[in-house]
Image (cartoon, rainbow, N blue to C red):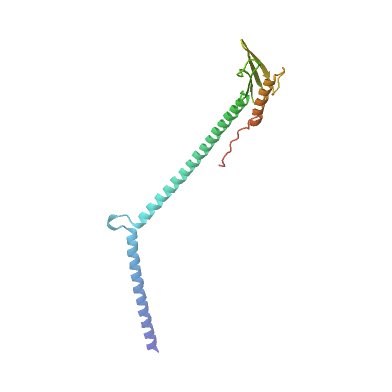
Amino acid sequence: MSTYVAVFALVLAYVALVAAYGALRTLARLRRATTVLGRGANGRESLLEATERHIEVTTAVAMELHNLRAELDAVKDQAIADVHREQQIVVDQLTAAQGSLARSLRNVALVRYDAFDDLSGRASFSLALLDDAGDGVALTSIAGRSDSRTYAKGIVGGKCEQELSPEETQAVSAAVAQRADRGSKPAPFTARRRAS
């Protein structure tokens, strides 16, 4: 029995020796690998040093990218504010221009006719000049053989305090119709704003 124990111990010692030899070889390979990682070949930087350097560079680039994004957001916000301010200026100018346009004499109608039976060529005329509120003037020129007469009558709201001739009435009605076709007041300008 002691022989069996001795053989068993011998086998166990052999297995332990083989395991220790395998462990030493693995340790030697690991040492060689860490030596390669720890120092570079031919005076170059090691893998660990390169990794640390790349981590530092990546951190610096990430910080710079963060700062650039912050600057870009600030510039974008300023640009949007500038665009809204310019847009409001344009809206105000258009609104003022539309107000001026509404007061301009842009509804014009002309009626030409022969005032006298013995004259031809429709040299006489009645001209209505009205703004969008229907205010303005009716001008009439009656051409005769030897002279010409011109009359002006004020129009308020499409009506006149004085009696209008049929031709003047026709001219005023035509000018009022132009105003009605366009709308009595211009539609206010509204700008659509983009969502920011």
Q: Is residue 184 visible?
A: no
- In which quarter of the view is residue 6 placed? bottom left
- Residue located at (34% from left, 59% from top): 38
State whether residue 93 is above or below residue 24.
above
State whether residue 14 is above or below residue 97.
below
- Work out which quarter of the rendered image holds the N terminus and state it: bottom left
State whether residue 129 is above or below residue 147.
below
Q: Residue furthest top?
A: 146
Closest to the observer: 118 or 35? 118
User: Residue 107 location, x and y as percent?
Assistant: 62, 25
Q: Is residue 138 visible?
A: yes
Q: Residue furthest left?
A: 42
User: Residue 7 location, x and y as percent?
Assistant: 37, 85
- Residue located at (35% from left, 69% from top): 26
- Residue located at (39% from left, 87% from top): 4
Closest to the observer: 16 or 109? 109
- Residue located at (33% from left, 70% from top): 25
User: Residue 35 location, x and y as percent?
Assistant: 32, 61
Closest to the observer: 164 or 92? 164
